[in-house]
Image (spheres, grey):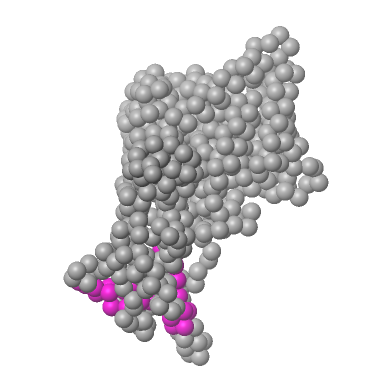
Amino acid sequence: MPNPLSPLRWVSPSGLANLWRTTRFTLTERQRLFGLTVAIGGVCGLVAVVFHHAIRGLEQLTIEAAFAATAWIPWVIAIPTIGALGAGILLTWIPGARGSGIPQVKLAYATKTHRIGFRDALGKFLIGILQIGTGSSLGREGPTVHICSGLATGMGKLGGVSPQNLKLLLPVGTAAGIAAAFNAPIAAVTFTIEEIIGNLEQTLLTGVIVAAALAAVVARSLNGDNPVFSIPQGYGLDHPSSLVTYVLLGFAAALVSVAFTDALLWVRARFAVTRMPGWMRPGIGGLVTGGLAVAAMAGLGVSGVTGGGYGSLIDALSGMFTVKTLLILGAFKLIATVMSYSSGGAGGIFAPTLFIGAMLGGAFGALDVELFGHEHAELGSFALVGMGAVFAGTIRAPITSVLIIMEMTGGYGLTLPLMISNMSAYAISRQLRPVQIYEALLVQDGHPTHPPRPTETLDGLMIDRLELELEPRTLSPGDPAVVVLQQVAAAGRQEVFPVLDGERRLIGVITLDDMASLAAEGDHLELLVCAADLMRPPVSVRPHEQLQRALDKMGELAARQLPVIDLDDRVVGLIDEAAIAHELLRVHAARTRS
């Protein structure tokens, strides 16, 4: 009889599977998550670099070669059109690869019913290269986020992460994607917090920071430690009088941001109801982009309408364009981006937004030179600030909008003008259009991530007004897996199980979703050491907090119950949605009678 401990028994496929399963359960869930975070950062950095170089290589072979051809006009029109049509055909098989990718990641993080599949990420990778590389006026950054989030989810499934915790890897992929795309790890962290997570969630912050840092290290090791935009000089606030013009720039950036958002949503709605076949629609965006690119080259002698437009953007930052060129090129880029995105292509709006902002900012720089007699170099300073201002007004990530410009250019001399213009653009655009563009896109598709709540009715109502469910079933971190399942089976309607330490203090929680992944292991439960392998960081409220706070944390936990703890972190009961709804109806009835 062969020795069961012989290494040779792992060579067979079944033996390898047993080895994988045994190894998987020698690590706790937290340890697997951290290991995956490190791996995701490195893999996403590598994939992002490959994605961007592939786009750049295809651009050189197609649209840039078309501009250099003798009969350049028909080629410049045809190549974006053909590339977009090809993307439209592929998107009929992989519809999940359509769009920017960031709204899809937001939806997957905010809901239980939507996932970022690896197939969609792979489709985004290939279709994004095809469409952006052939000249459609779209950015590579949003697709990079989508691709990295899909990779993070796929790696999480391969690593045996529970279904509930798979969602925690989405912000990790987002941060890695942004860091690699912009070479801006700090801005990647703030963007993930502002746009995906929505709050400063401590349990996710470490993973987000680690992934962003590693992705940036990988990208810099392959691309060099250089900023995305190499500006020719260190711009700064040389004249305090220019602050007046920066304020005006903030106002103008807000109006441009609103116009861009409204146009994109309106055209997208028109395409949605047209009788034109879906695969043909992106071709319309490519055709319009090609026509505008021809007009810009023939009339102004510049490119920039196609693709991300980084070359012309750098020229604007260097102060090389006239006011006429800046305004016309910015308008052309806005129209081309609206048509390319709204017609159903696969690409983002990050780079086009920065491009439009640079053109607007450069025009205000010319105004500043004319009004105050400042140096011509001011055009580049204003172009730089304009990038951040339109980004802040469109994407609505004000902190990121400041940091991303600093990291992308490697300059910090314009911090004050950036803050003034960006916050002005953010505040005004938010007042004019409260719903930011990614959320508006989801609402247009029937998938709002933040359904309205009656917060005005909940204001002032405290948790201690409710009758709590006392003496809930609790767990200890050392409870074996079989005991955990037995507690769940005997718990009735209880859905959240507090994990308490030796002094009965709350140290973690386990939900029914966590139990589902545990029960699926069947005969291998003995390989799980204890409940600590499954628990997540504690999410709870205190009696003096408001009911609205309890609802927000239930959404964070993706559960209908929540532990209530005292000042010593000891569980005093459970609060659930039914009790909150009952109290809400009672208060509403009392106010109606009065």
List x then y, in percent, for residue 310.
51, 25
Residue at the extreme front of the image, as rendered: 1
Q: Who's the residue at 76% across and 37% down the image?
A: 280
Q: Quadrant of residue 131?
A: top right
Residue at the extreme bottom of the image, as rendered: 593
Q: Who's the residue at 41% across and 40% down the image?
A: 10
566 up-or-down from 15: above or below: below
Q: Using the rendered image of the protein, determine whether residue 60 is visible from the camera's viewpoint.
A: yes
* Picture quarter with the N terminus: top left
Q: Magenta segment: does it hold 577?
A: yes
Q: Who's the residue at 56% across and 58% down the image?
A: 113
Q: Nearer the viewer, residue 406 or 79?
A: 79
Q: Nearer the viewer, residue 285 or 258?
A: 285
| Left or right of residue 535, residue 156 in this image | right
| Left or right of residue 133, residue 52 in this image | left
498 up-or-down from 61: above or below: below
Q: Magenta segment: does it hold 199?
A: no
| Left or right of residue 566, residue 368 in this image | right
List x then y, in percent, for residue 245.
43, 36
List x then y, in percent, for residue 252.
51, 41
Residue at the extreme left of the image, as rendered: 503
Q: Quadrant of residue 571?
A: bottom left
Magenta stretch: give its range.
Answer: 556-583
